[in-house]
Image: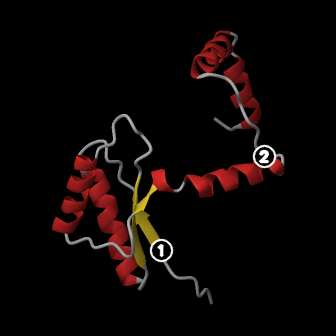
């Protein structure tokens, strides 16, 4: 028998008000956690620095509270977890499962366009994925 505790989350982005789809997912996850004596966590996806605001975050928290969806524990903010992601990235690079790319966004965009024009992307998809 599996003794692992159920732990689910909702991860809204504070780039706007709570979306009805996010509210629906929150409700399902909250109900699932309660039914299984698990935890319902709240993780704020605040990594979009240009569009994320404290006002939108506050409105999301108020909406979840108004819906009666209480989360367990502290709110997790993605922007505060950089050290964990850095450690994971370093491990993946060390294990040869990832590599560091020094290209700028503009260089990557140029490469993408060239590959599309040469139909390289479509060939790679055919080779590695079932369409």
Q: Secondary structure at mark 2?
A: helix
Point out which mark residue 39 bears: none
Instruction: Residue at 33% x, 36% y: name it.
Output: 51
Residue that carries the numbered disc 1 in the rendered image: 7
In this rendered view, identify the residue nearer to me: 70 or 77: 77
Rendering coords of residue 125 (x, y %) = 69, 30
Disc 2/disc 1 C-alpha distance (Å): 29 Å
Image quarter where the N terminus lies is bottom right
Instruction: Residue at 20% x, 67% y: name it.
Output: 65
Q: Secondary structure at mark 1?
A: strand
Q: Earlier in the sequence, mark 2 or mark 1?
A: 1
Image quarter where the C terminus lies is top right
Rendering coords of residue 130 (x, y %) = 68, 38
Mark 2 touches mark 1? (CB < 8 Å): no
In this rendered view, identify the residue nearer to me: 131 or 75: 75
Rendering coords of residue 11 (x, y %) = 40, 56
Instruction: Residue at 76% x, 54% y: name it.
Output: 91
- Could you say which quadrant of the image residue 50 lies in? top left
Residue that carries the numbered disc 2 in the rendered image: 93
């Amino acid at each position: 028998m599996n003794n692992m505790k159920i732990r689910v989350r909702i991860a809204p982005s504070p780039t706007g008000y709570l979306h009805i789809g996010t509210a629906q997912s929150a409700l399902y996850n909250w109900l699932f956690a309660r039914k299984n004596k698990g935890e319902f966590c709240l993780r704020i996806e605040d990594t979009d620095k240009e569009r994320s605001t404290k006002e939108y975050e506050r409105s999301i928290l108020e909406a979840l509270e108004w819906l009666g969806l209480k989360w367990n524990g502290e709110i997790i903010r993605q922007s505060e977890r950089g050290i964990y992601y850095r450690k994971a990235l370093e491990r993946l690079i060390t294990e040869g499962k990832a590599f560091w790319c020094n290209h700028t966004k503009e260089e990557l965009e140029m490469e993408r366009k060239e590959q599309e024009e040469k139909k390289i992307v479509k060939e790679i998809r055919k080779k590695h994925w079932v369409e």
